[in-house]
Image: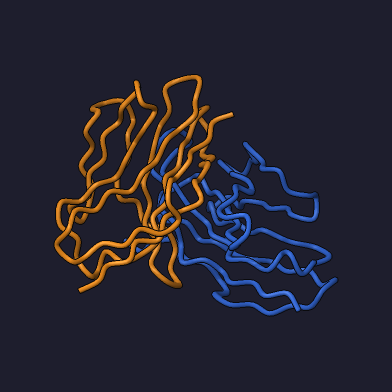
Amino acid sequence: AQSVTQLGSHVSVSEGALVLLRCNYSSSVPPYLFWYVQYPNQGLQLLLKYTSAATLVKGINGFEAEFKKSETSFHLTKPSAHMSDAAEYFCAVSQGGFQKLVFGTGTRLLVSP
Amino acid sequence: KAGVTQTPRYLIKTRGQQVTLSCSPISGHRSVSWYQQTPGQGLQFLFEYFSETQRNKGNFPGRFSGRQFSNSRSEMNVSTLELGDSALYLCASSLQADYNEQFFGPGTRLTVL
């Protein structure tokens, strides 16, 4: 069964610093990978998705992620953190032609001034 | 275009009761999925409906059920509520039943006392 692992339940950065949130996947076939963001008391918003078209995926709000098959990774990055980026981020994998997403445990991003 | 709407947003029930949650997908979307989010278990897939048919089901007891109507609106029902059913229940819709991105609603916060 497919799964994702997010390293670090909390990541703290200063405003303007690089954001790096880690996600590793486990899949026997090419996966479809997603990053979602959740702000307090809200649902999930899609940041970006990988569907095998390109290994470097650009998303909303300046985020991007690179699919690395050799490392089974799909890490999320942003060159310069903003205070508004403080939220919880979830990596997810989908496989099998169904709308079933398997989520990681989430990483809470804290941004300090 | 209106997003995914879920009603009610907050709900308080007591053990043993049953509850019905409603989800209206984005207009034109035919696939609806449900997820449970708890601090302990994270985000877990409940089930997915497409064209009024349940296509996939997660690992939840039979107390959890759902259905989809001809207008794509969906309901989920939980019978004989337990304290552990307290969670944020998220609904997501997508245009069709493949790897398209899912759009999430704000969720229904269920508290079981």
Q: Nearer the viewer, residue B45 or B7?
A: B45
Q: Height in image: B35 above or below A76?
A: below
In the visual, does A6 lie left or right of B47? Answer: left
The blue one among the chains is B
In the visual, does B78 lie left or right of A7? Answer: right
Where residue A69 appears, as percent x and y from the top left, is 35, 23
In the visual, does B21 lie left or right of A25? Answer: right
Q: Height in image: A108 above or below B99?
A: below
Q: Quadrant of the N terminus of chain B?
A: bottom left
Where residue A7 appears, as percent x and y from the top left, is 43, 46
- When asked about the image quadrant of residue B2, the answer is bottom left
Residue depicted at 42% across the width and 35% down the height? A24
Number of on-image labels: 0
Residue depicted at 39% across the width and 27% down the height? A72
Where residue A54 appears, as percent x and y from the top left, is 23, 27
Q: Quadrant of the C terminus of chain B?
A: bottom right
The orange one among the chains is A
- When asked about the image quadrant of residue B40, the answer is bottom right
Residue depicted at 32% across the width and 66% down the height? A110
Q: Nearer the viewer, residue A96 or A112?
A: A112
